[in-house]
Image (cartoon, helix red, strand yellow):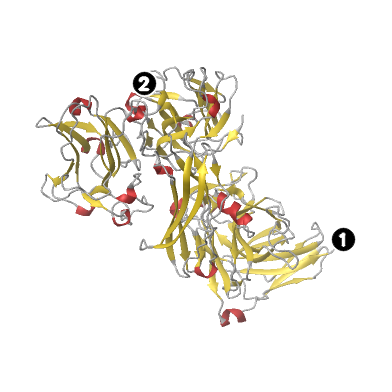
Amino acid sequence: MKLKSAFNLLACLLYPLWVHTIVPPFWSDHFAFGLAPDWQTFDASGQNVNWEYCSDYRDCAPTTYTFITCNVERFESPSVDDGYVFVNSFAAGNLPMSHVSYLQTPSINCAGKSSVFLKFYTYISALNFSPKDNAILQVKAGTGNWQDFTVFPNLDESITERKESWNPRSVLLDISAQAAQQSQVFIRWKWTGNTELVWAIDDVELFDMNPMEDHVVWGAQTGEGGFNGNLTGWTVTNFQDTCKWVWDSLGLVYFPDSNPKADFWGCSPTQSNGVALMNPAYCVSGGGPSPASLSSLFSPAIDLSEVQAGTPLAVRFYQSVMIGNAESGQLPVTSVMVSIDGGTSYLDTIDANPALPFSRPFCGETTIGLPIEVAGHGNVKIVFTFAGSTFFWMVDDVRVVERWSNDLRINPGFSAVSPNAVTPASQLLELSFLAEVENFGSLSQDFVNLYVTVEDEAQSEVFADTLFLGSMAPGQKIYDTVFQKKFLPPLMSGVYSCRYSVAAGMPDEAPCDNKFDWKIEVSENTFAKDNGICSIDGFFAPSETIKYEIGNCYFIPNGSDYCATSVGFAFRDAPILQGKNLKVNLYKWKTASTYGDENGDTIANENEFENIAFSAYHVMGDENGEIVVVPLHVDIPCVPLEDSTYYFVTVNYDEPAIVMGQEVPFFIGASEHLDYTAMFWLSYQLGLPQFVSMLRLDNENDFKANGWALRRIPVIRLYLGHITADIEKIAMPQSLKVFPNPARQTVFVQWDESYHSPEIWVEIVDICGHLVASRHLQNANVSQLSIDVSDLSSGSYILRVISEESLRTGKFIILNHQ
C-alpha cells in the first residue's frame, strides 16, 4: 500500500454550478449586506433580547467572550467575514423571566417546488436551558400553524455533558411537507433561555432537491452509504482486539469517565437513523486486551462502470473525529483505502485527516479525492481504517461524487507560517511567503492568482502581494513558487492576521478551502513556537525511552545587546513528579570552529554546540499544565547572547521519578496548532534554516533537529532581557572549589560555609550535558564532600550542587588512569 498525503475539505459550504438535474439554491441570504428590513426580530417576553447583525466577528459574540478560558475564536461559518446574525443571551444578564427571541425570514415563494430543503450554518452555547427543546426552528405556510423542527438533536442535559454545539454546525432539514408548492412560506428561529451565551446563524439556503445528492454517482440510495438502521452491507474486519467498527443508533460517543453522559456526538443530517462508529477510548478501557486498535470498515461493492473512465471522482462523507496516538508507524490514525478489484489490492492509502491536530475534535462534511483509475470500474471498494490507541471516528452519509468543475484548494499542511508563533520585536526578520495550491476540480483553471495579505489589530492592511500562477491542469499542484515581496512587521508589540487566498478566471464552486489564515505575534521579550496555553493539544513523552531532553531552537539575529533570562514550559502529572528536579539548559549551536548545522544533517552534533546556561526546576506538585517560568541561571540574571546565532533551550528529564518500583515518564505540553513543514522547507531554500524542536534521547550525544517532526511542537519558550551596564559587570560566582584538578580517583568539592541547605543534590555531567553521577543529601550541614570518580572516562566534566534556593557549579578534568 502506498501512503499518499491529502488534505480535506472541512465543514465547507457548497456553492455549485450544478450539473445533471441539480439546481442552485432558489433562495438564500448570507447576510453580506446586513439584516434586510424584511427580516423580523423580536422578543416575545418583552425584554428586548433580540437577534442582531454582526458585520465584524471581532466585535461580536462569541469572540467577545474573553472571560471564558480558551473561548472559541469566532463563529466559523463559511462566510463569517461577510457578517452573520446572532442573539447574545449572556449580555442580557439574569432576567426575571426567560427571553423568547425570534428571527423570522420574509415571505418566501416556494410555488412550483415539489421539494424544499433548508440548509444553514449555526453555533450555539447555552448554560441553563437545553438547546434540543429550546433552540428550535419553525416553518409555516400562509396563515397556517407553525411546525417545529429540532436543530440540535443531541444537546440535552440528560444526554450530553455540554450544551454547546459544533462550531459550525451544518443543518439540513427537509421542510417539504410545510413549504412545497406554497407561495408564502415563513421560517423562523426561536430561542427560549435565560443567561445563556450565544446563538448564531449564517448562510441560509433553500433548495428544491436534496443538496446532499449533488454530483452523486453512488450513495444516494437506501442501503448504500447512509447506515440506515444497520451497516447496510458494509462489513468490518478487526485485526487486533474487541475494539471495532459498530453501527450506533444515536451517534453518541462515550468516554469511560465518571460522567455517564455523552462526551461527543455526530452532526450528519441523517444521524438519527444510525452511524458507523469506532470508539476505542471506550472499548479498550472497558476490557479490550490491547492498548491500540486496528479495525477497517469495508463498503459493499460500488458499481462505477457507467461513469466515464478518467472522470475525476471523490468520496464525500460526514465525520465526527478526534485523533489520538497512532497504532503504529505504518498507518495514519484515520485513513481511506481504495480498491478497484473488490479488495484484492488497493491503489492508495490516504490520510483522511492530515490537518487535524491531536485531540482536537472535528465534525463536518469532508471530501477526499479518489484515484483517477476508479471511474469506469464495477467492483470498487472504499475502506475506512482506524489505527490508533484512543479517541474516536464516526462516519455517515458516504457518497462517491463527481468533482466540481472549478475547485481550487490551498493546502493547510504546506502553507508557510512565520518561523515562530511569537517573536520579540528586537529579533524580527523579514518574512517570506509560500503556499501549495491544488486544482482539485475536473477542468483546467486559467488566470490563477495566489494572494497574501496581512492586517494589524485595527484590521488595516499593512502588507499584500500577488503571485500569478497562470494555468493549472486538473490535479496539478504548485508548491515551490515564492512570493516576491517580503514583510517586516513594525518593531513593536502587536498581533497580525495573515491570509493566503486563491482565485481563478472562473468562480470557484467550493470556495471555503480557498483560504488559509494564521497569526503573527510580536512580543516585547518572548520567543515561542506555540500560540499560548490554549493551543496545547496534549502532553507527550517519547515511546523509546523514559529519559530524554526536549526543547526548541530559536535563531537570534540581534544578540549583542540582549541576554536570555528564563525558560517557560508546561507539563502534566505534577503530583507524581513532586520533589523531582527538572533541568533546563540553554545551548549555543555554535563553537569556535562550527556554525549551526555545519554538515547539513539536521542534527546538532556534539561538536557543534555548547551549554552556556543551566538551571533546575523543583517540582512542587501543584502545577497543572500551566506554563511555569524558570530562570536560566540562578547566579546571574541574564545570559549574554551573540548576533546571528542559533540557540536551543531545553527541559531535561534525566532522573525519573519512581512509583511502585517503576520509572514514570515525563509528559511535556505540545501544540499541533501550527504546521511548520512549509516554513522549514522555505527557510532551507532561502539559506537560513529555521529549526523547530530539538530532541535527545537518554544517553545520545546529539540533538535531532525537528525531532518530533514539524507539527508536534513542545511548549518551551525563551525569554530575553536587554543588557545593561550593571548586567555586564556581573561575573559568574566561583562558589565551588573542585580539587585536585585534573583528577584520577577522587575529587573534593568545597564551598563557603554560608551555603547550607536541608537538602542538596550533587551531580556530575559530561560536556554533552549527560548526567553521569549523582548524590542526594538530606539534612546536610557540610562544606566539603569527596566524590569517587574512578569509573569516569578521561575528559571534561561539570560538577553541580543544587538546592531549592540556588545552584553552584565547577569544572574539572579526568586524566587517563595509569
From the viewer's side, name the closer residue of 265 and 75. 75
Disc 1 to disc 2, C-alpha distance: 79 Å
Above or below, 802 against 259 in this view is below
Q: Residue furthest right?
A: 818
The residue at 47%/53% (across/down) is: 625
Q: Residue furthest left?
A: 143
Image quadrant in which the C terminus is located: bottom right
Q: Nearer the viewer, mark 1 or mark 2?
A: 2
Instruction: Tell me which residue sits at (63%, 55%) in the image.
Output: 684
| Helix, strand or loop at mark 1 | loop
Q: Which residue is mark 2?
A: 228
Residue type pointed to by label 1:
His
In the rendered view, does 714 fall on the left or right side of 232?
right
Which residue is labeled 1 in the image? 817
Q: Secondary structure at mark 2?
A: loop
In the figure, is residue 613 to the left or right of 63?
Answer: right
Up/down of 239 relative to 749, above or below: above
**Which of these two is toward me, 144 or 19?**
19
Give me the residue at 53% from left, 21% from top.
237
Does residue 244 appear anywhere in the picture? Answer: yes
Tell me the crowding category of disc 1: few under 14, some 14 to 19, or many 20 or more residues within 10 angstroms, Cα based. Answer: few
Percent x, y of residue 18: 36, 32
Hey, which quadrant is residue 146 in on the image?
Answer: top left
